[in-house]
Amino acid sequence: MRERIEAALRASGADYTEIRLEERESTRVVFRGQDLETADVILDRGGIVRCLVRGGGWGIATFNDLADLPRRVAQATEGARAIEGEEPIELAPVPACEDAITVSLERDFRGIPVTEKKALAEAYNDILRSSDPRIVDTSTSYADTFSRVTFANSEGTYIEEERPMAGIALSATAREDGNVQQAIEAVSRAAGFEAVTGHHALAETVTRRAVELLAAPRVQGGRYTVVCNPRLAGVFAHEAFGHLSEADFVYANPKAQEMMVLGRRFGEDILSIVDDGSLPGLRGSHRYDDEGTPTGRTELIKNGVLVGRLHSRETAAKMGEQPTGNARASGYRYPPIVRMTNTFIEAGETSFEDMIRDIDLGIYACDAFGGQTALENFSFSAAYAYVIRQGQIAELGRDVILSGNLFVTLKNIDRVGDDFEWIEWGTCGKGQGGLPVSMGAPHVRIRDVLIGGE
Amino acid sequence: MLDRLMQQAEQAEVFELESEATNIGFEANRLKSFEVEETRGVATRVVVNGRLGFAASSDLDATDKLIANVLESARHGDAIPFHFPAPRPGPPVQVYDPELAALPTERLIEMGREIIATVLAAEPDAHVNVDLERRVRRATVRNSAGTEVTVETAPLSISAMVERVRGDDVVTLFEYFSTAVKDEGYRTFAQRMADKLRLAQRAATLASGRMPVLFSPSGTPVLGLPLMLGLNGKNIYRGISPMAGRLGEPIFDAKLTVVDDPTLDGRPGSSSHDDEGIPRQRRVLIDQGVLRGFVYDLKTAAQSSAEPTGHGERGLFSPPAPSFSNLILAGGDTPLADMASGIEEGLLVESPLGLGQGNVISGAFSNNLSLAFKIAGGEIVGRVKDVSIGGNIYEDLRRIEAVSQEAEWVYGGLRLPYVLLAELNVVTRQ
């Protein structure tokens, strides 16, 4: 295959050409309630060619049929020429490299029979179903994926990478009359079968929480001091702030650059946010991004001040900054765009007890069901929450949706915890399909957060 | 392939998907990318010893492996008491317009420029990303009962994302337009964005409280999404829909009528048959507030002892699941011009954030609004920032104040009117 790829690159008439091919095999076992939804194996194979012609635009071809790579290169080159005449696109230089990244899995899921994967999922699902008659629905999903990605460009880079991923997602729905409550937990890691075994206690947590939420009152809408647990604070770092630090938001928009000017203060000294794709074993980790740029640590907010942003080669060239290894693609259907890898709020010094001690009435918001941002505005829902009364964690509450303005909210972070936790699942949906990312944080306290609700 | 499967299975189905698309991308008001996409793949289902199996592949050289995978899947599968359908004719519906399928890329580029020009005329500081896509999609279902149905559609879709930054004040707008017949509707689509941006230039403040809330067609999905989940046969079978077991009951205000209509010419969501080869038909799901039906695919229908309704939809890599074709909230009897006229002080919801977040199946919604306007004295007076709404459709749709006569297509497959609720919880920073 290498010869065919390199021959196609040599034959290209474009100024820059890259080819990325992917071969993926996934096994999936899904239970809903007492039913097996599916236990299946998916084979996915395809590729993308991306070309740049001086003074032109990006020409892109994606395909499943890998037979005729030179034709795909020609299609992409034609596309790049067809839109010539607009602003020139430059790529920041990155040294050419050759590398082959192989993984050795503790328990390679490719050698484990479907019977065993099904038995594991069924065992979790049985725990979800059996504990309480008010549990009306459950879902247990097992998924493993092994991908081989080959990236090569006309500058001499040739990288082969194996990308494993194994995970389970557990959810339970409890119902009592018209009251329906859900709880979800998931674990997914770039690892072997060992990542998904031994989570029986997690399944018990899920059912217990779904049932407990039935009796929990809705939290009264209004403005509260909110303590976010690490898993919610991590989602906040990614959703509310991280997306604004992606250079494709600012690089073509001078007004947005003014808003996100380096050196601007975003928060108090205690707040530091980092993206690092080179940390070993996390969901967003790779040695290179999908343009062949080495990944690394990028400080975004340092002691409250904006100090960096995330780049592709194109955005870096346009802004005269260094590429950061954040050009990532959700599979062969998509060209790489600026994406986060593993994004986290660095641990601070406040203990959890000190954080809640002086709160008369507040919310302890835990985990996230989801989140969405429209730049300065964000909205996400806590999976569950507790009311804080007189410095103590009090009753469980439900339907807690946090929303607000990013700038105001970052400034209102007044305590950062001395603990830290990575989220063991995480998928970013920016623009394309889902992409594995990690998010991490300690407990974080935010003053004056808008909680929606009744 | 079907013949090979039939030698080893009681029932078999082969679903082939082929799709070719051209996509023109504008970024920050400039022409940026030209993309061609070719998709090919095969999915298959078999029933062996009464058990259902599924497998799929986009690897064109892997037929043997695909067959082995689907048979292995069936060994683990559940026993499902259903039969792949025998051939039946579907309604005539126009979803392939050769002129649209062959629309020149120069024309796509022109349309993109026109959309950007319209937006910039209203808001010179706007940065607009536009994607224009012309696609031909061919899906063929063959099964052991003799069905062989090919559905060919040629949708044109345009998505636009607008950002306007001024200081720390940001307006974002996302809009989607699609059609399966050559029409000039993209102009209205562009004009609508321009109108919203113009309105957003004035700021207004609003105090928290319970007040009248008017949902525009782009805002109405806040109410529509819990309805869609509640009407989905899968949630009926699972017993988690609050509408389960309530056929014939008046659940909502008589102003609410919900129809799924796959027979509309020129809509990308229309087709003669669903992705399982079952003929489609127009179905009234909620008739003047009374629950009349749900949407099922083969499997959920069999599980619920109901008839399949022709709502099996699938991508390549997933088994079919019930889904809507064109979901229509029927227009009401109030002219659009009169919808806001009686409102002393209230809110117009344009762009919700966080759709689908939270406990949607229970009917609950709670959304921060990325674009919303204050209504005072019957007029739209300016943009309200940092505002969120919350409620539950099973309470709040029991009484609907008014539904507009006019409706618009939003997000591709939804046709929605303006909906006015007399009282809803609104939380703002004031």
Image (cartoon, rainbow, N blue to C red):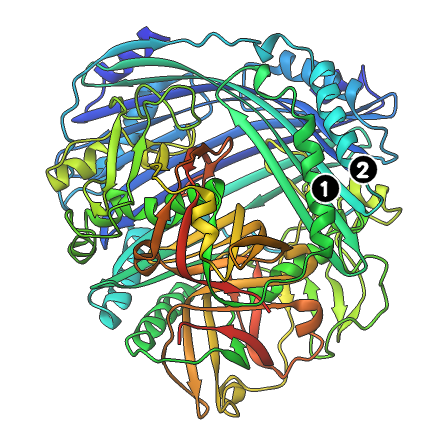
Q: Secondary structure at mark 1?
A: helix
Where A100 sits versus A181, above or below? above
Q: Quadrant of the C terminus of chain B?
A: bottom left
Q: Residues within 10 Å of mark 2 (few under 14, many from 20)?
A: few
Q: Amino acid at mark 1?
A: Arg
Contact between labelled residues 2 and 1, with CB atoms less than 8 Å apart? yes
Where B418 sits versus B95, above or below? below
Where A207 sits versus B3, above or below? below
Left or right: A440 with respect to B26? right
Q: Residues within 10 Å of mark 1 (few under 14, many from 20)?
A: some
- Tell me how many marks there are: 2
Q: Secondary structure at mark 2?
A: loop
Chain under callout 2 = A
Residue where numbered disc 1 is placed: A208
Q: Can residue B249 be seen at all in this image of the molecule?
A: yes
What residue do we see at 52% from left, 79% from top? B209
Residue A330: x and y, percent? Answer: 42, 32
Left or right: B422 with respect to A447? right
What residue do we see at 24% from left, 33% from top? A298
Question: Considering depth in this image, is B5 or B202 the residue closer to the camera?
Answer: B202
Q: Earlier in the sequence, mark 1 or mark 2?
A: 2
What residue do we see at 38% from left, 41% from top? B22
Q: Which quadrant of the figure has residue B225? A: bottom right
Residue B162: x and y, percent? Answer: 32, 59
Whether callout 1 and callout 2 share a subunit is answered: yes
Residue where numbered disc 2 is placed: A131
Question: Considering depth in this image, is B211 or A266 the residue closer to the camera?
Answer: A266
Residue B75: x and y, percent? Answer: 79, 18
Q: Amino acid at mark 2?
A: Ser
